[in-house]
Image (cartoon, rainbow, N blue to C red):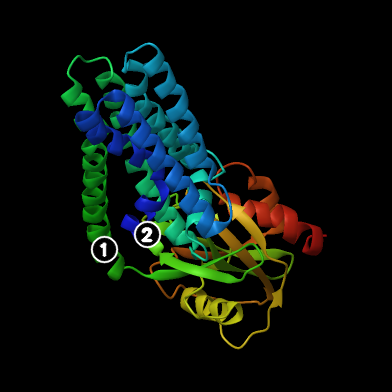
């Protein structure tokens, strides 16, 4: 996404105030307001000519310009008009904050309206939200500065903050965001990339593994294989170095799907890597969505019956042990098993396979 283009499209409401700053110095307050209003109306007309729709954001700005400008001229005091940049900034900051802290990304909806046909995948959307946090903090600071400058006697200070000051703020934001993205890109090049999916399993993008496992809540596919035998199930113990659920007993086999890899092939690969099992048949059950504090997974569950013995093939597994269903039942809810395994045992294994 071209940020300069996005900025030009999302901030049309600030152009009239920039025009006013210069027009007021040349023609005075009345004609400065008139010129600024004409610019806003031209902006509104151009937008309608291009899209055949009235831009509500610019329309609101025109209304605010008329109201505050009218009050200022009626009282022969430009104080109320000087509040306009701060009010507009507060509104923009509110849009950004609402987009970040709610489930409704207003800024993305605005971007989609201004930038027809723009495609954005979940990882890009996550990156956008990270950038929006920085933008929110800077815009909040600018809003207080813009509102505060209206109370100052120095019109030059207000003019700088309300006009060039806004672009200084966004210049800082772009440099800050560019620097962080540059550093992240170097890290991401060395990282493993995982596919991202929607809730029906269609691949919709990709993301670095470190991002997927760092509370980004990007939905990604994983495979789980339960190996059953003689009224029991084989479980693996997660090693202590694992970031998620260390030292707990978990599904016999579990792992991520690689980019371009089928679900079946991922299950076979993970099984070979973790317990050394090959040439077996497994039943594919219905997938489900699992959300923990750190990640969001679409879990594809498989079942097979094997006697073993098995052996750990990597440092990803500490131990493999057979548990009777009775033993599993006696340890549920005590922190022995991963929450994910307990969910699958109670909702998938027990209803179908535990008598």
Viewer can see residue 248: no
Q: Position of residue 207 (x, y in %)?
A: 42, 65
Q: Describe the element under mark 2 as helix, strand or loop.
A: helix
Distance between the Cα atoms at labels 2 and 1?
Answer: 9 Å
Say which quadrant the N terminus sits in: bottom left
Left or right position of 156 against 166: left
Asked if the residues shown at circle 2 and circle 1 are in contact, with their CB atoms under 8 angstroms apart, the answer is yes
Q: Position of residue 204 (x, y in %)?
A: 54, 69
Furthest residue in direction right, as rendered: 355
Q: Position of residue 161 (x, y in %)?
A: 23, 31
Q: Describe the element under mark 1 as helix, strand or loop.
A: helix
* Depicted 130 relative to depicted 190: above or below: above
The front one of 136 and 239 is 136
Circle 1 sits on which residue?
187
Q: Quadrant of residue 164?
A: top left
Circle 2 sits on which residue?
210
Q: Position of residue 185 (x, y in %)?
A: 27, 64
Viewer can see residue 12: yes
The disc at residue 171 is none
Q: Quadrant of residue 234?
A: bottom right
Say which quadrant the C terminus sits in: bottom right
Furthest residue in direction bottom, as rendered: 279
* Depicted 333 relative to depicted 86: above or below: below
Q: Quadrant of residue 94?
A: top left
The front one of 116 and 341 is 116
Residue lying at 67% horizontally and 57% vertically, measured from the top left = 344
Left or right position of 283 against 320: right
Residue lying at 27% horizontally and 44% vertically, measured from the top left = 170
The front one of 354 and 301 is 301
Residue lying at 29% horizontally and 26% vertically, measured from the top left = 146
């Amino acid at each position: 996404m071209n940020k300069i283009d996005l900025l030009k499209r999302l901030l049309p409401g600030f152009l009239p105030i920039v025009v006013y700053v210069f027009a007021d110095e040349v023609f005075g307050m009345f004609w400065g307001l008139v010129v600024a209003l004409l610019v806003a109306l031209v902006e509104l007309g151009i937008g309608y000519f291009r899209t055949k729709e009235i831009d509500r954001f610019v329309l609101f700005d025109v209304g605010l310009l008329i109201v505050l400008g009218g009050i200022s001229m009626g009282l022969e005091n430009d104080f109320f008009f000087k509040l306009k940049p701060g009010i507009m900034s507060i509104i923009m900051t509110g849009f950004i904050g609402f987009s970040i802290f709610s489930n409704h990304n207003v800024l993305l909806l605005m971007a989609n309206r201004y930038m027809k046909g723009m495609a954005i995948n979940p990882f890009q959307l996550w990156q956008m939200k990270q950038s929006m946090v920085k933008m929110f903090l800077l815009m909040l600071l600018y809003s207080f500065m813009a509102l505060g400058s209206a109370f100052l006697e120095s019109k030059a200070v207000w003019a700088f903050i309300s006009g060039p000051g806004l672009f200084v703020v966004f210049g800082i934001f772009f440099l800050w965001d560019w620097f962080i993205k540059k550093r992240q890109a170097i890290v991401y090049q060395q990282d493993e990339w995982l596919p991202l999916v929607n809730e029906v399993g269609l691949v919709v993008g990709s993301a670095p593994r470190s991002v997927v496992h760092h509370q980004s809540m990007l939905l990604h596919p994983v495979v789980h294989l339960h190996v059953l035998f003689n009224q029991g199930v084989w479980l693996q113990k997660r090693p202590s170095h694992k970031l998620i659920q260390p030292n707990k007993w978990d599904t016999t086999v579990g792992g991520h799907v690689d980019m371009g890899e089928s679900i079946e092939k991922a299950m076979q690969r993970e099984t070979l890597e973790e317990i050394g099992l090959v040439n077996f048949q497994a039943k594919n059950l219905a997938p489900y969505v699992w959300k923990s504090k750190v990640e969001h997974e679409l879990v594809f569950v498989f079942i097979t019956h094997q006697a073993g013995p098995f052996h750990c093939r990597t440092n990803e597994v500490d131990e493999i042990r057979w548990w009777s269903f009775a033993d599993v039942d006696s340890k549920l809810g005590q922190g022995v098993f991963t929450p994910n395994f307990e969910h699958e045992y109670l909702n998938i294994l027990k209803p179908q396979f535990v008598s």
